[in-house]
Amino acid sequence: MGKAGFGLAVSCAVVSCTIAAILVGRRVKSRRKWNRVVGVLRELEEGCSTSIGRLRQVVDAMAVEMHAGLASEGGSKLKMLLTFVDNLPNGNEKGTYYALDLGGTNFRVLRVQLGGKNSLILGHEVERQPIPEHLMTSTSEDLFDFIASTLEKFVEKEGNGYIVPLDRRRELGFTFSFPVKQTSVSSGILIKWTKGFSIEDMVGKDVAECLQQAISRRGLDMRVVALVNDTVGTLALGHYHDEDTVAAVIIGTGTNACYVERTDAIIKSQGLLTKSGGMVVNMEWGNFWSTHLPRTSYDTDLDADSPNPNDQGFEKMISGMYLGDIVRRVMLRMAEESDIFGDATCRLSEPFILRTPLMAAIHEDESPDLREVSRILQETLELTNVPLKVRKVIVRVCDIVTRRAARLAAAGIVGILKKIGRDGSGGVMSVRTKTGEPSSRMRRTVVAIEGGLYASYSMFREYLSEAVAEILGEEVAPYVVLKILEDGSGIGAALLAASHSSSSVGSVTLL
Ligand code: ADP
Ligand code: MG
């Protein structure tokens, strides 16, 4: 080999070595970055752990806080609000009634026709529409004028057997899904806004009166006869269909629960007497807090960035308004730790860009190549060509966040059952009949559940019922039935309007 040939060979070797070194360096770097992504995932998994031991602690904490909230005003983060509903519809209600259901995202107008004894609900019509976003932070007059005008247009379409007799005023039940201090079954004062609403002039005002005034402004002849929380409406419908229903839970934009309590257990309202000896209590459980809740830095940041920091801590871990944003925050952290999404990650910094229904669609994508995940990442977050292994990580993040939410809601439900002695902790087969046969002392217990998140997200439902069964144990679990109720909060409000109507034919007691 000549000198020139030798030089060329050496140069080639040097170049190859350099390329190899660069490649190895890149691989090492990319493995390091990938390891960081895996690290974020592991940390999330650990932070969101809901072992059975932890869930039992949450159950106990919920029951303890319920006691505290019933003992004194401000005694707990759980407000445990009186609803003045001491009897629930029983099937005798007859006639056409209206309802308005103002949730966190959706607004519904309903007309329900009740057939009286044994014929139950003959029919119902619902018109749904999203609440225009600007009205969530406008004035109370703007919000209620919008509601009343929608109602007016709906009433104009009355027909098909839904006619209200001319000698009777139309009556309406108003479902208002925010914390209200009730002063009677048909009046109550707004305590605070939640779920992104903020109309300052409304706080401290009578909600039913605001609606009644807006109805009058439009010249509509209709009376608000019941002001109910969405949980209470759902309980009313649940009990109407199945009298073993003792509690109701909402899992939609926000989350909350109510249940039937004995009046003598409501210590803070001594002297409260009802014919039935019971009253429905609106827990406002979205504000529940316990050090046993598995909280991560994503939750702390989400809370700090929210318009209501240190408020609604349980809700922020469970409900539809927030789950998608927790996932977004984890993805953003992964992007900051590595370059798994390439350079185009700016949309990930936009709060609430990943809505919970999209997160559910990512989670429930069953295609082998996660095609739906690709589509959502591209269309919503402008993330293109995200590799399959990264898409799998995102699906796993959704799974962790939803599983935690559903299992915490399950622990909340068992907490209520524990408070009212329906969790089977006293034993299931401990009563003997006259013939000496062991007999069950555990009563069938139904919990009605409503809300867009629960109704539309099957993985959430599965995780929730699995956790309820796991906490209760196999002996007790068959006695507890979780029943999904579509439009329960609205139809239930119409039922309560009927049972509190001036032409009411009476109803049975609760307990
Ligand atoms: P509101 O809380 O206004 O009464 P809904 O009970 O209908 O309304 O709940 C709406 C919420 O449910 C949405 O804000 C969303 O977070 C959640 N949601 C709706 N559809 C889905 C879905 N397919 N998957 C997961 N969550 C959903
Ligand atoms: Mg609702």
Image (tube, helix red, strand yellow):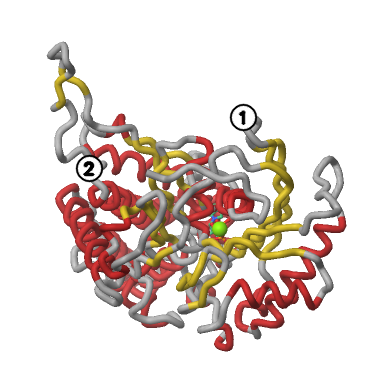
**Position above or below: 510 against 327:** above
User: Residue at point 38% right, 35% down?
Assistant: 481
Circle 2 residue: 471
Q: Is residue 290 visible?
A: yes
Side of 255 where 444 appears, left or right: left
Q: Position of residue 166 (x, y in %)?
A: 86, 53
In the rendering, which numbered label is found on residue 431?
none
Q: Residue at x 57, y 45 (%)?
A: 506
| Crowd class of label 2 (few under 14; some 14 to 19; many from 20; radius 10 Å) | many
* Number of numbered tags placed on the structure image: 2
182 to 113, vertically: above or below? below
> Between 448 and 353, which is closer to the camera in this rendering?
448
- The residue closer to the viewer here, 471 or 438, is 438
Hey, what amino acid is under mark 2?
Ile
Circle 2 SS class: helix
Q: Position of residue 27 (x, y in %)?
A: 31, 63
Picture layout, residue 443 above or below residue 74 = above
Quadrant (top left/top right/bottom left/bottom right) for the N terminus: bottom left
Asked if residue 1 shows in the view, the reply is no
Residue for badge 1: 118
Tell me where residue 51 appears, x and y as whole percent: 19, 50
Going 52% across and 73% down the picture, which residue do you hit?
Answer: 188
Instruction: In this rendered view, identify the residue nearer to me: 117 or 4.
Output: 117
Say whether disc 1 or disc 2 marks the residue closer to the N-terminus. Answer: 1
- Picture quarter with ligand 2: bottom right
Residue 376 sits in which quadrant? bottom right
Q: Residue at x 60, y 48 (%)?
A: 495
